[in-house]
Image: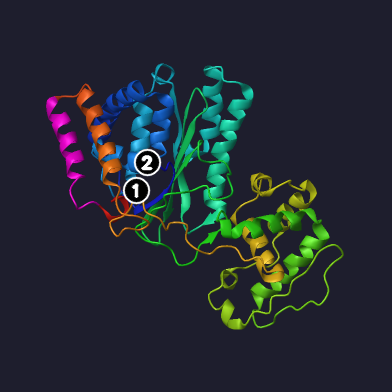
């Protein structure tokens, strides 16, 4: 079973009707109680990190399957549903949409103190929350701006992240899933089972395996010292202001092998550097100076440095490519189907037994939930419709 992924949906406008949200809270409370009782809090967290489970649960609770609101409203409904029962269930939900998302680390620390978690475990949970948000906003530059971040965790330290970004121009939203069991390296291939209704044509993907050389070179450049780093950045600024003049160097600095890229102008026709403006920026220079002084031990430490954002890592990536030949990945990471396969057999045919198992377990939870008969029948009918061959393409 794959636990993480990305999904893309239409961008909602408007609000969830109060009557629907109240109903989702009531139904969500029952389903959560049953799932935790049946499988335990750690397994509930793991299932939240699975895009198929998250999507299916939202559908059971009657929200639109293909709308961005499923993410924000389902998370808010679940958070409200377990309010006051967190300690009994052993499940804790922090964060949410907009300003609430920025309070996530604070909420994690508060819950950690209330349930007497070890201090190092609390700090680690808060760190993972911050890093997952930073990675998906700075290292996966796909045009989607993160506006929703929620963090689920259990007493044992199992955690999951569900966050969402929006692309207003495209009228779309994209959801990102993380799980503690699978996130062994926060800056290298942290997503799997990636799914999207559409991909973007230009995305800087610094978490790709293909970007490993870029990540390593970025650390080397900042550790070489500020004078050497700023000399490289000056060259980048010349490129971003005038692509017609290629900088050619015959000799490298002492202890550093410098590779000249003999690139034809045609290679820059759709290159991201065309859209950059790396003219004199005091803020960028300040952050680069901080990095050069801190000398981060690895790329994760570089990214975790306060003030480092999309433009900083993009500048380092382009310096590495233009001057040293370390080309990062520009492929949209949303390129795989969900954990259960795809209708066009990409990357493999639909795994019907596994998909049916998800539906069966949710159906059993619905039957055990303390719902009115009419609500139970409607929820079961929604689940049963998902067995029909007319699912949306990204969750087939």
Name the residue at 39% across, 20% down: 89
Secondary structure beneath dot 1 equals: loop
**Mark seen at residue 154:** none
Q: Marks 1/2: CA distance?
A: 7 Å
Question: Would you say the residues marked 1 and 2 are in contact, meaning their CB atoms lie under 8 Å apart?
Answer: yes
Residue visible at 67% across and 74% down?
239
Q: Which of 354 and 173 is in front in this view?
A: 354
Chief secondary structure of the magenta portion? helix
Residue 347: image location, x then y, percent: 38, 56
Quarter of the image where one finds residue 90: top left
Q: What stretch is highlighted in magenta?
A: 373-391
Query: Can you tell which mark lies on residue 72?
Result: 2
Q: Is residue 69 above or below residue 216?
A: above
Q: Which residue is drawn at 56% across and 72% down?
A: 271
Q: Mark 1 points at which residue?
A: 68
Asked whether residue 390 is drawn in magenta, I would say: yes
Of residues 217 and 129, the one drawn nearer to the viewer in this rendering: 217
**Disc 2 secondary structure class:** helix
Q: Quadrant of residue 98?
A: top left
Q: Is residue 7 left or right of residue 261?
A: left
Q: In which quarter of the image is the N terminus?
A: top left
Res 317 → quadrant: bottom right
Q: Is residue 227 magenta?
A: no
Residue 225: x and y, percent?
A: 81, 56
């Amino acid at each position: 079973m794959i636990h993480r992924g990305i999904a893309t949906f239409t961008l909602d406008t408007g609000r969830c009707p109060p009557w629907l949200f109240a109903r989702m809270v009531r139904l969500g409370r029952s389903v959560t109680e049953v799932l935790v009782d049946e499988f335990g809090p750690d397994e509930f967290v793991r299932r939240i990190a699975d895009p198929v489970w998250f999507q299916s649960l939202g559908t059971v609770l009657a929200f639109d399957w293909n709308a961005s609101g499923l993410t924000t409203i389902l998370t808010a409904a679940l958070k409200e549903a377990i309010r006051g029962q967190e300690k009994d269930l052993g499940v804790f939900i922090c964060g949410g949409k907009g300003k609430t998302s920025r309070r996530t680390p604070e909420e994690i620390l508060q819950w950690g103190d209330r349930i007497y978690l070890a201090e190092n475990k609390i700090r680690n949970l808060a760190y993972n929350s911050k890093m997952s948000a930073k990675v998906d906003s700075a290292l996966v530059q796909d045009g989607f701006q993160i506006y929703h971040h929620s963090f689920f965790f259990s007493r044992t330290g199992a955690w999951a992240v569900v966050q969402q970004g929006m692309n207003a121009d495209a009228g779309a939203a994209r959801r990102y899933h993380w799980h503690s069991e699978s996130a062994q390296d926060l800056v290298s291939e942290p997503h799997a089972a990636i799914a999207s209704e559409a991909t973007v044509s230009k995305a800087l993907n610094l978490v790709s395996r293909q970007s490993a050389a870029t990540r390593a070179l970025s650390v080397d450049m900042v550790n070489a010292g500020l004078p050497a780093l700023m000399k490289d950045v000056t060259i980048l600024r010349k490129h971003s202001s005038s692509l017609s003049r290629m900088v050619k160097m015959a000799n490298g600095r002492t202890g550093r092998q410098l590779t000249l890229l003999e690139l034809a102008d045609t290679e820059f026709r759709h290159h991201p550097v065309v859209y950059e403006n790396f003219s004199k920026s005091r803020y960028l220079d300040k952050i680069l100076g901080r990095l050069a002084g801190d000398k981060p031990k690895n790329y994760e430490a570089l990214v975790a440095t306060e003030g480092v954002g999309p433009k900083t890592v993009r500048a380092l990536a382009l310096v590495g490519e233009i001057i040293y030949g370390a080309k990062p990945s520009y492929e949209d990471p949303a390129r795989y189907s969900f954990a259960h396969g795809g209708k066009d057999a990409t990357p493999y045919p639909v795994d019907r037994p596994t998909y049916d198992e998800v539906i069966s377990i949710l159906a059993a939870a619905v039957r055990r939930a303390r719902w009115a008969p009419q609500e139970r029948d409607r929820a079961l009918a929604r689940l049963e419709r998902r067995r029909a061959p007319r699912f949306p393409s990204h969750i087939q």
